[in-house]
Amino acid sequence: MTEKQEILNVGIDLGTSRSAISASNGRRDWVESFVGWPKDFVARKVLGKAILFGAEALENRLSLDIYRPLERGVIKDGSERSAVAVKELIRHLIETAKGDNGYGQTRAIVGVPAESFKVNKLAIINLVAEHADTIMVVSEPFSVAYGLNALNNAMVIDIGAGTTDFCIMRGTMPDEEDQRTILTAGDHIDALLETILRERYPQADFTLNMVRHFKEQHSFVGNPPAPVMVELPVAGKPTAHDITLEMRRACESILPGLVETALELIAGFDPEFQKKVRNHIILAGGGSQIRGLREHLEGVLKEYGPCSVQVATDPLFGGADGALAMAVDMPDEYWEKR
């Protein structure tokens, strides 16, 4: 390897629900943001591992002390165990990206919510420091914008599990005034849908994890593309339930905050360029896949003038790919300042 090749650049999207990594060696991977430790020596014998991640952890959760350590984009409760879980999750992602190859240096850019608390950014830096030589923390919607080259007169709305993050781009690194975070996002939809389903079908037996899967398969706003029918156990018997109205109500609960925040950012932009921003709005993240969302947002914003809303082609790796592109392009002096 040459000296240049010995540097591994990685971009990490550390998400409440899913975390993804893209590396300069061509590797990409993602994992559901769950970390679990065997409860006792019997569980350790059965599982054969000291720690499990993602889908494997969920599948074996009855044998584990399991953590979803990120909540609303920050380390949950600020607890030591959650911090350790985040650290292990980062280690797992970086080791997966490295594979069996050795690298002289690892440089990482990590995406966090747009208005993440400064203490959370410092905590993330400290947790990554063991596994990367140089670290930078940026906002998730900015990393998406960078990866799409939407760097001027554009707005990215990144709808994740814990937060919905906004970043308006003016051809420079975004300032705090260019970014917003609201807490009505995927987890909010899940919690509301669970509540109203329990009210509607009190005899049915289900978990929040089941509700989350229903949302991922059937979410929509506006007119339903088809009735939403799911199976829920009643007294142990799988029974068909119509949850169309409940799904619509839960998904549409995020619309007021999303529209209000987008309009607020556009209104604060230079008035000569507001039209250009309205015509370059990008929805990203898992929530961008909600059926009818793009059309709804575009329809509302068209009341203020011409508008075009697009959906990012890769909701899973958009943030990680953008962070990687930034890491590759970043001049050395910018790394040194941080």
Image (cartoon, rainbow, N blue to C red):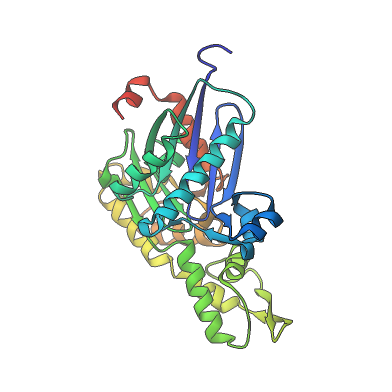
The residue sitting at the right extreme is 237
Q: How many numbered marks does the figure carry?
A: 0
Of 44 and 291, which appears nearest the observer? 44
Residue 148 visible in the snapshot: no
Residue 40 visible in the snapshot: yes
* Residue 51 % position (x, y): 59, 50
Of 276 and 333, which appears nearest the observer? 333
* Residue 130 % position (x, y): 44, 35
Quadrant where the N terminus is found in the figure = top right
The residue sitting at the top extreme is 2
**Residue at 56 percent of width and 86 percent of height:** 200
Quadrant where the C terminus is found in the figure = top left
**Residue at 50 percent of width and 48 percent of height:** 310
Query: Is residue 23 shown above or below 70?
Result: above
Left or right side of 272 for 87 = right
**Residue at 47 percent of width and 34 percent of height:** 131
**Residue at 69 percent of width and 50 percent of height:** 48
* Residue 154 % position (x, y): 39, 42
* Residue 209 % position (x, y): 59, 67
Left or right side of 62 for 178 = left
Query: Is residue 321 shown above or below 15?
Result: above
